[in-house]
Amino acid sequence: MISAMMRMRGVLLLATLLAVAGLAHAGDYAQELQQKFGLYPDFKATLRVQVIGHRLALAAGLPQASFQIFNNRELNAMAFPDGRIYLTSMMATLVTDDELAFVLGHELTHIKEGHARNQISKATGGALLGAIIVAALGGDAGDIRTGADIAGGLTYGHYSRKDEHRADEGGVRLMSQIGYDPLKAADAMQRLIDKYGRGDAKTPILGWFASHPDSQSRKDRLMKLGDQLKEKPAPALADPRGVTLALDPSALHARAWLHPFLSIMLVHTTGGRAVVLPDADYPMPPMPADVRLPADDNAKKDEKATLNDVAVVLPPAQPRYTVSVALTEVPAGGAASLAEAQGTAVEASLVWMDAVTGMGGVCAGIAQRKTRGPWRAQDELNDPAALGKLEDGKHANLEGTLEAAALRRAARVFAEVVRADGPVDHSVPVSFKFKNPNLRVNDALFVVRKSKNVVEPVAEVRVTAYDGKTVTGRVLWGTHTFKRNDQFVMVP
């Protein structure tokens, strides 16, 4: 009897541990979506989502929010407590700009008001209950984990009626603040009705339309909210600062991808404070021809299998900054010359000038690898995975080249200039303990800090000297004052 009780207690303890581990599992659901469906590799759709999303995030006071599109045929979007917002390729390409602004504003409100974080807690509770039930029925460790995952996953993303109404109100207000028509929010709900009917929408992906209040009543409320904001508009967000782009002769080979890439980088890193103005010399690359929606056996025969092309309409912006980009090969690892270098390195130099203040400067970023080889990008957009490599921040290059990684770093430096409304002094070197046998001069390190359960980089340091134990470097952007619990992570 005692041994049976002890065995049951041990099983329940295992169930509890596995369910608690499900908290990280639920919080990492976005990565599962990305791995299962893949990122949608269309520059135009991504740029539109980034421009609208980050303008909304700025109005909401959530400048660290990030936006991704995964490839799926449902009309769906979902928010995570750390500021990540995912939406389907169908949502990103089917809806109008006004409707998209409402959807993203709705998700941002879930994050701002803590609804998304509450769902993590509910998911963990559901995982715990599911694990204990399976354990009590005699399941082994694998069964217990499956029970925890299923129960936790079914709980995540289901908001209360009150939370949904609050998110609707916030979405309409935010879209109005950045210049979109609040009366169009109801059109987004009509799309839901057209696709899923008038009752609660049930889709294979948990999130925005997973378990919402009755769609028709929500549409009626949205129309009333829109009328109210038409009569008494919300305070408008200031227009972003326009950036005009020129290419140095050393970067002409990057013409095919540099304009949309830098556009996405600057919108993302400045939180929507700056947009790269369109230029006829830099046409937006077409969507890869072989990208299609995933197969769906339940889809109607007459339903289109391809996605809509989208037009990117930038918010009003007067030219404020002129930026010239150069891409040059430099000695890897700080070697004296290219011939002596062990590896390949590229420096992206972003020369900027502020037309209002007359100030200017150079923002530089270096990316390198230990092997020798070509670095000039030519056919990067032929690969449907190219956008994923640009966006996920985990790849050192784009299609075997280093330009994108170097330019990403230079864009982060320039973003600080935009946010600070002028150059920031980073001339004082920094020094700290760090051990990594792969670290070399000119590598970059993120200084990562946890604050209020959010882990984010607070600085980026370029290594100028390294003796195997201590790093001496120059801050590219961010703080010069590091705290005891800060972590140092090599930038890929």
Image (tube, rainbow, N blue to C red):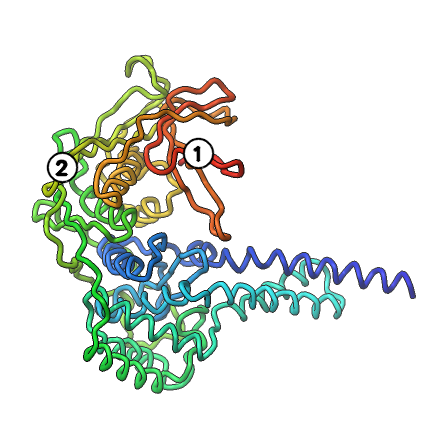
Mark 2 Cα-neighbour bin, 10 Å: few <14, some 14–19, many ≥20? some
At x 36%, y 28%, the residue is 462
Q: Quadrant of residue 327?
A: top left
The residue identified by callout 2 is: 353
Q: Visible in this render: residue 288?
A: no
Q: Tag 2, which secondary structure? A: strand
* Nearest the eye: 271 or 51: 271
Dot placed on the residue nearer the N-terminal end, 1 or 2: 2
* Nearest the eye: 152 or 411: 411
The residue identified by callout 1 is: 490
* Nearest the eye: 272 or 291: 272
Q: Position of 453 compared to 222: left or right?
A: right
Q: Amino acid at mark 2?
A: Met
* Nearest the eye: 217 or 257: 217
Q: Could you tell me which quadrant the N terminus lies in?
A: bottom right
For residue 33, above or below residue 340: below
Mark 1 → mark 2, Cα distance in angstroms = 30 Å
Foreground mark, 1 or 2?
Answer: 2
Q: Are marks 1 and 2 in contact (CB under 8 Å)?
A: no
Q: Position of 358 compared to 224: left or right?
A: left
Q: Amino acid at mark 1?
A: Met
Mark 1 Cα-neighbour bin, 10 Å: few <14, some 14–19, many ≥20? some
For residue 175, above or below residue 53: below
Q: Tag 1, which secondary structure? A: strand
User: What's the mark number on residue 211?
Assistant: none
Residue 186 in the image, given as x and y percentages of width and height: 27, 79
Q: Could you tell me which quadrant the C terminus lies in?
A: top left
Number of numbered tags placed on the structure image:
2
Residue 80 in the image, given as x and y percentages of width and height: 44, 60
Q: Visible in this render: residue 491?
A: yes
Q: Position of 306 compared to 323: left or right?
A: right
Residue 405 in the image, given as x and y percentages of width and height: 31, 36
